[in-house]
Image: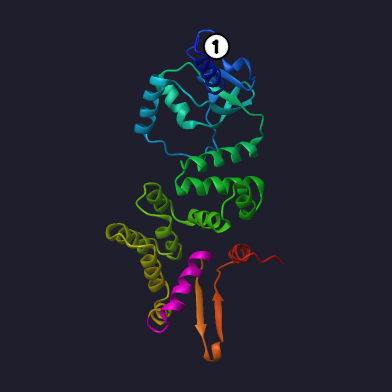
Amino acid sequence: MNPSKRGLGRGLSNLLPYTSDTDAQPVVQENPNYQEVEVSEIHSNPNQPRKVFPEQEIRELSQSFHSVGMIEPLVVRRIDNHYQLISGERRLRASILAGFKKIPVVIKQVNDLQAIEMSIIENIQREDLNPVEESRAYQHWIDTTGQKPSALAIKLGRDRTTITNLLRLLKLPPEILNLIEEKKLTPGQARPLLGIADSRQLKKLTQRIIQEGWSSRKVENEVASLTNPLESSKRLYKKDPNTTHLEDQLRIYLSTKIEISHRKHGKGKLMIHYSKPEELERILEIIGFKS
């Protein structure tokens, strides 16, 4: 036998559960945490961040399993007399559709919090979560741990303001969140709508945004004119473009109303608005202030 082929075979056996070599042994015997288990013993995770699984996507993956098998195992943990899924919901659904009785898994010894974190990180790395799913996953982690978004940002290696802005989306009505999940609205278009309290006004404005394809900036300006026409008029007609642009940038960064006014001799005021103590705490955290 060609020595190079034998080397290739040994390399593959370290990567895949089985090889075409009839003398090769399954990796499961080398690693006790790698096993093949009954599909019926694997239960979905109720805290799975991803909620939307397109049927076509599952069918295509199921067909690929028939052709090449399941190359990447699921990640699970043992709970009582069954396994709970940590990551691989899409692959689990596809394997059920394919009619598999047993599938490969990697068993992790982790607690509830670690399982949540692993699931969030796995989905973010794969870019599988839509913004609303990601927001809900972050909120669940915060509710479970009692920690602040800044701690989650450090753990996930993400920008703190990104996580904070995603969390704010959850304050929007369910119908707006549905539109984001359906990709009819972007988070940037939807976030300014938090300033609209009237449900009928919100519905009409949302329809115009979708139908006319408004930019996030246009949505911000329209919401400003609806919620405070006088201030909007002063901002649009009396302030120089540089000041207006800076206000817009700060408003996006802090996700709150910002006012900048210049006076003679270079003096001026920067006003940051907040509606409740929790909002103030969030703003102070973003700018890095520690009392």
Q: Which is nearer the eye, 6 or 193? A: 6
Above or below — where is 188 with respect to 179? below
Can residue 252 be found in the magenta stretch?
yes
Q: Which of the 4 image quadrants contains residue 186? A: bottom left
Q: Residue at x 55, y 91 (%)?
A: 265
Furthest residue in direction bottom, as rendered:
264
Amino acid type at circle 1 is Ala
Can residue 165 be found in the magenta stretch?
no
Looking at the picture, how far across and down is residue 193, in whole percent?
42, 62
Q: Which of the 4 image quadrants contains residue 110? A: top right
Above or below — where is 167 with respect to 274? above
Q: Residue at x 46, y 56 (%)?
A: 172
Looking at the picture, how far across and down is residue 127, in whole percent?
47, 43
SS assignment at label 1: loop
**The residue stretch that appears in magenta:** 237-254
Picture colour scheme: rainbow
Q: Main secondary structure of the magenta part?
A: helix
Q: Residue at x 51, y 73 (%)?
A: 258
Above or below — where is 43 with respect to 233? above
Q: Circle 1: is it few (<14), some (14-19), or many (20+) Cα within 10 Å?
A: few
Which residue was labeled with disc 1?
24
Furthest residue in direction left, as rendered:
211
Q: Residue at x 70, y 65 (%)?
A: 290
Q: Which of the 4 image quadrants contains residue 46? A: top right
